[in-house]
Amino acid sequence: MKTIAVLTSGGDAPGMNAAVRAVVRTGIYNDMRVMGVYNGYEGLMNGDIEELSLRSIGNIIQRGGTVLRSARSAEFTQESGRLRALETCKKFGIEGLVVIGGDGSYRGALEFSRLGVTCVGVPGTIDNDIGCTDYTIGFDTAINTVMEMVDKVRDTTESHSRCSVIEVMGRDAGYIGLEAGIAVGATSILIPEFEYDFDKDVLGRMQNTIVTGKRHFVIIVAEGVGDAMEMAKKIEQFTGIETRATILGYVQRGGSPTVRDRVLASRMGNEAVRLLRDGEESCVIGVRNEEIVHYPIEEGLAMKKTIDVEQYRMAYEISI
Ligand code: F6P
């Protein structure tokens, strides 16, 4: 393979730049030309592409976001869009494509690979909701950001003997909520994977801890589980404890990646190019028990991830 390309797609995640850097450096190390595609699949359709040099991706390993920018493309889900992208690949001589993104981006890669361009998916999303990998690039940074932010909110929550309902990201997945919730010692963690009973799991837990002398409370609510503002009102109404809602929002998607994310991204980006170099079929990369693995895209997409019930139980037990 003489020419490959790299793009970032879907919601951005800290560590994507480290992955792009690893792809470019590994490609050039292996005598390939590496093209950078801007704006995800949109750029592939529109030819928004330039060759990346060793130095053009310098000084980005520590930066959040993605220098290649990202997009969610509706047009690429249509065959007409993918055929336009194929024309671009032919024009630039692109034979292999590294797609850094989430499962939506993987579905695009699967369809595109059927047109003859070998695609390798690298998991980049803060949500950690990709079945074929234990960890996605960006998750570690996101949970550390949540932890730092909640620690700050907690200071003022404690000073005023209040309750704080804090909404975290994760679309339909509770990985951020669960891990960050454990790390901040939340009284309740409400995530989409587990049904909850407001009286028992929120009010009841608060009441139980009040009896033992607790005066401030942090409730972590994953996006999609319920409205944090509404929940705060209800808590105040039923308990009489002043309650505030904080929606952390996009702060969770930015910032300088942690060591763990930089290293994971570097390993995955490197492996993606080595697979292309070695003539492997289209696939998606993951990490299992600290080892980098890969699976055919369809197989990887079919893998289901389940949240750790034991972790949830443990969090429940130690937040009394
Ligand atoms: O996929 C990552 C994520 O941050 C989700 O947690 C969130 O629901 C979503 O992206 C928000 O995406 P958008 O960029 O479309 O607002």
Image (cartoon, grey):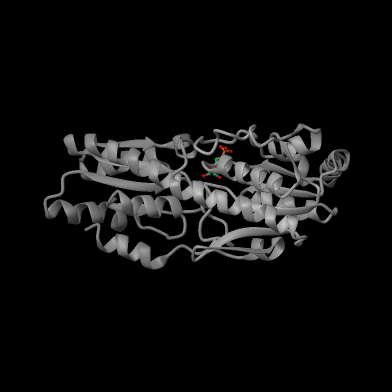
Residue 224 seen by the camera: no
Q: Report the image quarter containing ligand 1.
A: top right
Q: x and y percent of residue 225 in the render?
A: 45, 49
Residue found 49% across the figure and 37% down from its top: 62
Q: Residue at x 64, y 36 (%)?
A: 70
Viewer-proximal residue among 309 and 225: 309
| Coordinates of residue 132 in the picture (x, y in percent) | 59, 62
Quadrant position of residue 84? top right
Numbered label tally: 0
Horizontally, residue 56 falls left or right of residue 64, namely right
177 up-or-down from 68: above or below: below
Left-right relation of 70 to 311: right
Q: In this rendered view, identify the residue nearer to me: 90 or 303.
A: 90
Residue 186 is situated, as x and y percent measured from the top left of the image, at: 29, 50
Image x and y of residue 85, in percent = 82, 41
Seen from the viewer's position, the closer of residues 94 and 208 is 94
* Residue beneath the point at 31% across and 57% down: 201
Give above or below for 279 relative to 66: below
